[in-house]
Structures are given as structure tokens and as C-alpha cells.
Amino acid sequence: MQNNNHKLATKLIHAGAEPDPTTGAIMTPIYQTSTYVQEGPNEHKGWSYARGHNPTRDALQRALAAIENGKHALCFGSGMAAIDAVTKLLVPGDEMIVGNDLYGGTYRMFTKVFANFGIKFHFIDMHNAENIRNYINSNTKMIWAETPTNPLLNIVDIEACAKITKEHNLLLAVDNTFASPYLQNPLDQGADIVMHSATKYLGGHSDVVHGCLIMNDDELLARLKFIQNSCGGVPGPHDSWLVLRGIKTLHVRMQRHCENGEKIANYLRNHPKVGKVYWCGFEDHPGYAIAKKQMRGFGGMMSFTLKDDSMNAAISVMKKTQLFSLAESLGGVESLIGHPATMTHGAIPREERIKNGLVDSLMRLSVGIEDADDLIADLAQAIG
Ligand SMILES: *Cc1c(COP(=O)(O)O)cnc(C)c1O
């Protein structure tokens, strides 16, 4: 039933899934098994041990490849395990150029884990992709871009990055977690690897931790698959099944996330106590033109500051919201509020953080798919 000419909404429901050959079950079963019987030594149906292959995970991988317009996908036990596998493509002495406004956990893994293995990271401003050229040398192997960025919703021009990486024979990896395949397909813009924390929009229900990589190149797949199987950061079948179920409604959820996001961004922007609102759908957002070019909408992620830029003012708001739960993570059906300075980005030194715009009162919203009027009323009573 897989047909790559289908549009996204059809692929989300059908790609990768065939009715179970044994029973006709329409939904891919959870193959909760660690191993598979062999006819003779190494005589098997393609499944020998579940670190390497699992039919539930395989179905999800086919679906993820299809919805990112890619050829191949690999699933991991978390978004971080997926990033870990990509970074292991490098060897000591290699260098990676990374956007300086990125997920705190990625920053932590690069600086606290892989820097110890002799890989060098340059954290740079990627607002203007041309800036990347200033950091390329003969050791550079990869560019890591996140767009829109977390939590400031800055936009990196994927096509412009891809032009540079192609000129220098580098790999371009894009963390597409915030946009989801509904809003953006980086492979179409020239990226080599797309990464997702499927914990977020792909899963969509705040009930699973999962990650994935999507790519076109067969050799890159072979290298990453070797790392996946050797290092073992694979997801369990039940978690793969939850993501497989989650993506079936991605388009419906994302449509509402976008509608609610727009209403709430505009509400906050007109609130007398609110300072700045960071949402890439505002026409005066510095990345608006690029966002419009490479995205199909602007999503439900945004951040805002208070005119009273103190930790206490922000903490007071976060303690008062009732529909917006104070929690890490994003991309679920329920609305969340978070405090990057002390939560997701707590690992980044304060000075570095403030320099990059992550001030003390900055709060990040993951706008869910509840009724927008109720969400606005909740923010109104919390901000006061
Ligand atoms: C959550 C997140 C990650 C890490 O993914 P996990 O599934 O939590 O390991 C990476 N990048 C971004 C943008 C994220 O939001």
C-alpha cells in the first residue's frame, strides 16, 4: 500500500503498514520478541536478533522515511540516542559546526561527552548561513542545524546551508523536531540527515521517548545502521508502536497546533505585561522570510519574556497556569509551559545563555490542541 506519490495525509496513515500476514490485523502488531527461530544457521526470514531488526520498528522506519520524503529511516530509543549515532560518524580530530541556539541536551552531549573523545565543536550564529564558511577547515566533517531553534524560534536557511556543505563535501544534519514533517522536510532542501526526537510531535501524546534519523544515501544508511546495531541504542517494539500510532494523526494535530499557536502568539504580543514574543510566524520575526520559504506553517512553539525580567516574575506565572502544565518536553496534545533558564537549558552557563537571548523571564510554550479561548483565558489569569 506504500506509494511515495501519495500526499502527506495519506502517507501518515498508510506508509509502511501492511495488514499482518498471519491474522490480517490492520494495525501492525507489537512484536515483543528478542529473537527469531532459524531454519538452519543464518537461514532466516531477515530477522535474527531484535537489536538488529524488529518488525514493529521496521514498519515505523518505512513510515518515517516516507513522511520525510526520504529513502531510509532508523529508529532509536530516544532523540539523544539518534544524535549520538550521528556524532559517531566522526573520529578524533574531526570538527563539527553547530548552531549556537540549540537543544540543551545536544549542547551537553557535544561538550561533555564527545569533546572528551577528541571531536571539536564550533557553536556559531547561523542566522546568516554564510557565517558557516568562516569556521570550515580541512577537519570539518559536519554541520548540525536545528530549525526552528529551541527555545528562541530562530530560523536557519537549510537550502543555503546545503549549498555550503555540498561545496565542501560535508554532511548536513538537521534536527527537525520542532517543525515535524508536517511543516518542513529538510531532505528536500538538501540536508543529508534529518533527526527527530519522536518523543515530541511524532509521538504526540507525551507517552513515549523515541528518536529517529531519516536519509537518502545508501552508504550513509549502512554506516549509521552499523553504529545503531553496534552501539545498541534501539527502541523497544511497544515504543515503536506508540510512535506508529501517533503519526497517524500528525497532520490533524499539527493543523490545530498551528491555529492555536497563531492565536496565542498574537494574544501575548498585545499583552501589556509581556516583553518580547518569539514566534516565527510574525512578519517582523528576523527569520520570517526563510520560514515562509522552507516551512508550510509556523507551529505551536513560542517563547515570551515579561517586561519585569526577573526569575520571580516568571516563576509566579508558571505556578499560576492551570491548563499549561509546567513540564519539560513539547509537542504533545496538551499545552505545556517551561522555563529554559532552569529547565531545558540549565546546562548552559548563565553568561552564555543571556548572551544568546535566553533571559531569566523567558518562558517557552508548547501550545496544545485544546480550545484556544480556554488557553488564552488561562494565560490571562496567570500573567495578571
Ligand atoms: C527533546 C529534544 C531532543 C532530545 O530528544 P529525546 O527524545 O528527549 O532524547 C533533541 N532535540 C530537540 C529539538 C528536542 O526538543
Image (tube, grey):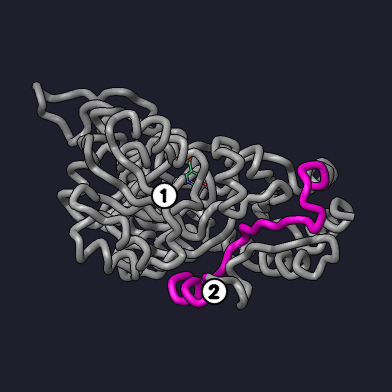
Q: Quadrant of the C terminus?
A: bottom right
Picture quadrant where residue 205 is located: top right
Against 291, residue 332 (above or below) is above
Q: Nearer the viewer, residue 85 or 304?
A: 304
Q: Nearer the viewer, residue 335 or 309?
A: 309
Q: Secondary structure at mark 1?
A: strand
Amino acid at circle 1: Phe
Residue corresponding to mark 1: 123
Amino acid at circle 2: Tyr
Residue at x-position 81% and y-position 63%: 373
Q: Visible in this render: residue 9?
A: no
Which range is magenta?
287-313
Q: Is 49 within the magenta?
A: no
Residue 182 placement (x, y as % from top left): 48, 63
Against 276, residue 248 (above or below) is above
Residue at x-position 27% and y-position 65%: 164
Residue 129 placement (x, y as % from top left): 38, 66
Q: For the residues marked 2 and 1, what is the alpha-carbon distance in whole angstroms?
A: 23 Å
Residue at x-position 21% and y-position 28%: 48
Residue 177 placement (x, y as % from top left): 48, 52
* Ligand 1 is within 8 Å of the C-beta of the residue at disc 2: no
